[in-house]
Amino acid sequence: MIDASDVAAARRRIQASIRTTPLVQGEPFATYLKLELAQHTGSFKTRGAFNRILTAAEQGVLPGAGVVAASGGNAALGVAYAAVNCGTRARVVVPRTAPAVKVRKLRELGAEIDQVGTRYHDAYQAAIRYAEDTGALFCHAYDQPEICAGQGTLGTEILEQTDGQVDTILVAVGGGGLMAGIAAATGGEARVVGVEPAACPTFSAALAAGKPVEVEVSGVAADSLGATLLGRIAYDVATRAGVQSVLVDESDILAARKLLWENKRIVVEHGAAVALAALTSGAYTPQPGERVAVVLSGGNTDPADLT
């Protein structure tokens, strides 16, 4: 479990290493758009990666073998970037289905890359074995306290940038680390809504079952939201905070991503468009006067299909 104090500690720890990303007016879609695609490596994952690695360094437990992470791409990019900037080596394990743009960026960052299987779970198992064999520090994509607290610094920024004048924050959910961090950071100051592709329903399935359960995942957003199991931290924080679950369809995601480009000239990956799709599809309808912030969580995508 994490709370606002963990997020505050993460903010102090990583502040010098991350960007405070822009919050812009979101008309005609929302009150605000949080442009986390402008973060180092193009997604929010860098926040949690820095917090995990810097915490280990502070505690004197950062191993000579470096760090290892498993990811469909964005978490691996965050870990690789943070590792380089913290002076340690990084090995990342990604599925063979990971987008080429993300794999190319990993190579540019100097990470050791291992492509295994076709799902996040395959990469995860390989990364765990590597950590056990070498002693490398394992950086989970979404279910470690330091990771979730680091991601939650995004929520703190939203509260500060709006002077607390935000009622609801819409955020896409895969494994749930970002959702957990934002819910912990806001501490009830704003409602948090977790938005998922109907083809990757880890959060809604967990709420229905009363615990995280394995689900089948597919669809256009699976490269970034393709975790098959919601994190335990995410489930605990979300149920404590009363986070609402909303599902959107594939066509809604594609339409939201295209509308964002056509109306704002903002390019996001499909997983980031999921949060906006809740509004543009009508899956989430704000009350009159409700001030809504949409987290655009990443921009690591090929823009060729937007025109």
Image: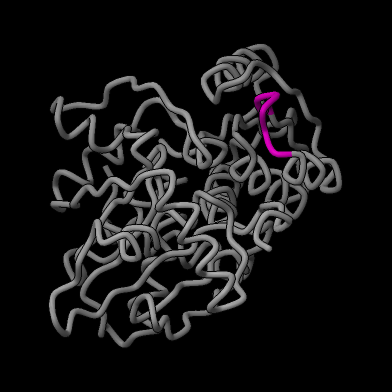
Is residue 60 toward the left or the right of residue 208 in the image? right
Residue 195 % position (x, y): 32, 50
Residue 159: name its quadrant. Answer: bottom left
Task: Classify the position of the N terminus by image quarter.
Answer: top left
260, 190: nearer the viewer: 260
Quadrant location of the C terminus in the rendered image: bottom right
Q: Which of 165 and 83 lies nearest the eye of the viewer?
A: 165
Q: How many marks?
A: 0
* Main SS class of the magenta portion in the image: loop
Residue at (68% x, 56% y) in the render: 41
* Left or right: 171, with 3 as reference point: right
Q: Is residue 285 above or below residue 63?
A: below
Q: Is residue 57 left or right of residue 244?
A: right
Residue span colored magenta: 93-99
> Residue 61: where, in percent of width, then height?
59, 36
Measured along the vertical axis of the image, is residue 45 above or below residue 116? below
Q: Residue at x 71, y 52 (%)?
A: 302
Is residue 294 covered in magenta?
Answer: no
- Residue at 58% from the left image edge and 60% from the top image edge: 268
